[in-house]
Each structure stands twice: as C-alpha cells, then as structure tokens.
Amino acid sequence: MLAVYGTLFFEWCGEIAALIALFFFFNIVFKRFITSLRQRFSKSNQIGKESFVEALYLPLSTALWFGVCIQVVDFVSTHIAETSLFNNKSKIVASGLVLCLVWFLMRWKNKGIEIIYNKLAFQPKQESYKMRLDVIDKLVTVGILILGGMLLLEVTESNWTTFIAFGGISGLALAFASQEVISSFFGGMMIYITHPFAIGDWIILPEKNIEGYVEEIGWYVTKVRTFEKRPIYVPNAIFSKIVVVNPSRMTFRRIKEVVGLRYNDVSKLRAVVLDIDSMLKSCPDVDQSQAPSAYFSAFGPSSLDIVFTAYTKACATDAFNRVKEKILFNIADIVSSHNAELAFPTTCLEIPQGIRLHVDTPKVSADLMT
C-alpha cells in the first residue's frame, strides 16, 4: 500500500514539476520576446505599441503564476484530501484575471503618458500639453476602474439590481455628507475643460489675497506656490465662485508712469514731451501697434506732470522690469539734455512787503569761545 502511495506521490510531484518547469520556460521566452519588441517599437517611435508591450509582461506573468498556483493547490488537495479547497475555482480564476487586466490597463496608460511626457519635454507649449495629458490620465483612470468593477460583478455573477439600489441609497447619503468634496471634484473637472490656467501659470485670486505659480492641479485641490515659496492648497470649488486673474497669458504688459518737471522748466516742457514721445515710438522693446504716447497731463502741486504709456513685448517679470528701467533711464537723459530737472515735493513761502523778519542769532558762551 505504501509502495502504491509512494508511486502516486512521485507521479504527482512529477506532474507538478513539469507544469512549473513549462511555465518557467514560457516565462523566459516570453520575457525575451517582449524585450525585443519593446526595443524595436522604441526605435520606430511607435508610442502605443511600445507602451503596450512594456506594460504587458508583469500583469500577464502574474496572471499565469496565479493560475498555476490555483491549479497546483487544487491538484494536491483533490488527490490527497480527495476534495477541492475551491468551491468556485472558475470564479476565483476569473476574478484574478480581471484584476490583472485592470493592472495591465493602468500600466499601459501610465507608460503611454510617461513616454509622451518625455517627448514633450522640449516643446514650447509643454505646460498646455501636459495639462491636457493630465485630464486624459484622470478620465482614463476612472474609466478603467469602472470597467474593472463591472467585469468583477459579471464574473462573480453578482446581483446588479441589489448593487444599483445600494449604490443609489449610499450615493445619496454620501452626496449630502460630502458636498464640498463633490463640488471640488467637479470644480477640478471644469478647470480642465475651461482651461483658465495651466501648471506653471502665474495666477492671482484677488478676493482670497493669493498670488503665485500653479504647481499642481489635483482632483480636490490646486497647489499654488507663492512668491515667498509657501505652498497654498486651494479647493477647486473656489475657482467657480471667484475671479481668477492669469497674468501669464498677457499678450503685452503696460508701463504707465508720471514724470514731473519743475515749474522753473515750463519753457522746456514742450520739447521734453516731444522727445519722450519720439523715444517711445522708436524703442525696439515697445510694441508700436499699441500706440505708445507721452503728453503733458496736469499742473501738479509742485510739478508739471508728464504721463507716458507704452506696452512692452516682454511679459515676464524680470524682462519687463529691465525694459521699464531702460525707458526710465532714457527719460532721465532726455530731461538732463534740455537742462531741466525732475521735480520733487516743495513748499514756497511768500512774505508780504513791509514785513521784516528778525532772526535771533544764538549766543555763544564764553566757555565755548575759549
């Protein structure tokens, strides 16, 4: 009897070893095949195929391992205990395959997005493209999860009616309990659809006194880095209720300043205004289609006010300030060339005739004199 059981045991071990060896052989061959395909598609710049084969190996290998393990455990339990440990082996295997399928789709999506990101690294409008890819990434993720849930319900033969009824009741309760979360979620979706700003944009929220650069647009919050390098996490629901200023999308940036001359230089005022106007209209850093101008605007309390307006082609803060500095230096040179001076706040005291001022001179003590 023992000899019979020993013979059967060795036969079982042989069958199991043969199955595992066959799987290892298939796994090695399949891995090499996948590697060669990935290198081939990478050289030919085929993003879809490259991401597909790169994402395929681990999920498929895991699915095969899962199937082999289930088969081995079921084989051993059936031949030794004469009963199967799995009452619904087909449902377990199908559920595992669905999970591996969801894993593969997520990997395929992530690999494809990663490859496209790398190819857009040196594009001039990379931030706009990256935001669109982020939208696609999130929508595809939701679609894959919904598909995986539906397939799991299908392979496990769950009751759809009960699930839908439970989902409706729990969804209604969840909606009342998390209105802000849901509104922020849809607020994030509206940001992606309407595209008022993108990652890297400089935005201003006047009502919230927030100004900085957008670093991340998430499902619930948007991360804004202020000029003091402090991160601020703004719920997406706020963006549908307040005004958002996006200076990063300025086509031009305006310079509007007031220059004051002394009242003693009133005879030189007309020539100074004409020279400033001519300088602005010949400046290569000023956009001439926006009609730069300079004009005498008012008799100020202590100055003759000249207002000049110009639109610079440079919109970035550093470049804009450099252009503005250059224009102000040119105006100072123009004023100096006419032997005029810039005014500063002064007060004149007029003394009527016939009034003599008496100024007491301080007495110096004898000790200080000595």
Image: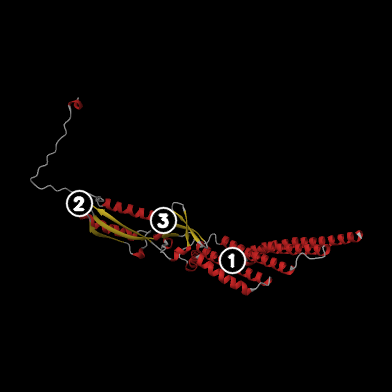
Q: Position of residue 344 (x, y in %)?
A: 25, 50
Q: N-terminal of the two: label 3 or label 2? A: 2
Per the image, the residue denoted by label 2 is: 264
Q: Residue at x 72, y 61 (%)?
A: 31
Could you tell me if residue 265 is visible in this image? yes
Task: State left or right for residue 121 relative to residue 323.
Answer: right
**Residue under circle 3?**
317
Q: How many marks?
A: 3
The amino acid type of the residue labelled 1 equals Thr
Nearer the observer: mark 3 or 1; the answer is: 1
What amino acid is labelled 2 in the image? Asn
Viewer-nearest of labels 1 and 2? 1
Query: Within 10 Å of the Cα at label 1, are there few (<14), some (14-19), or many (20+) other Cα atoms?
Result: some
User: Can residue 185 be seen at all in this image of the molecule?
Assistant: no
For the residues labelled 1 and 2, the Cα–Cα distance comes to 73 Å
Q: Could you say where residue 14 lies in the image, as x and y percent from the top left?
A: 84, 61
Pointer 3 and pointer 2: residues touching (CB < 8 Å)?
no
Q: Secondary structure at mark 2?
A: helix
Horizontal side, residue 57 vs residue 135: left or right: right
Looking at the image, tell me whether mark 1 or mark 2 is earlier in sequence order: 1
User: Distance from label 3 to label 1 (Cα)?
Assistant: 38 Å
Tell me the residue that label 1 is attached to: 141
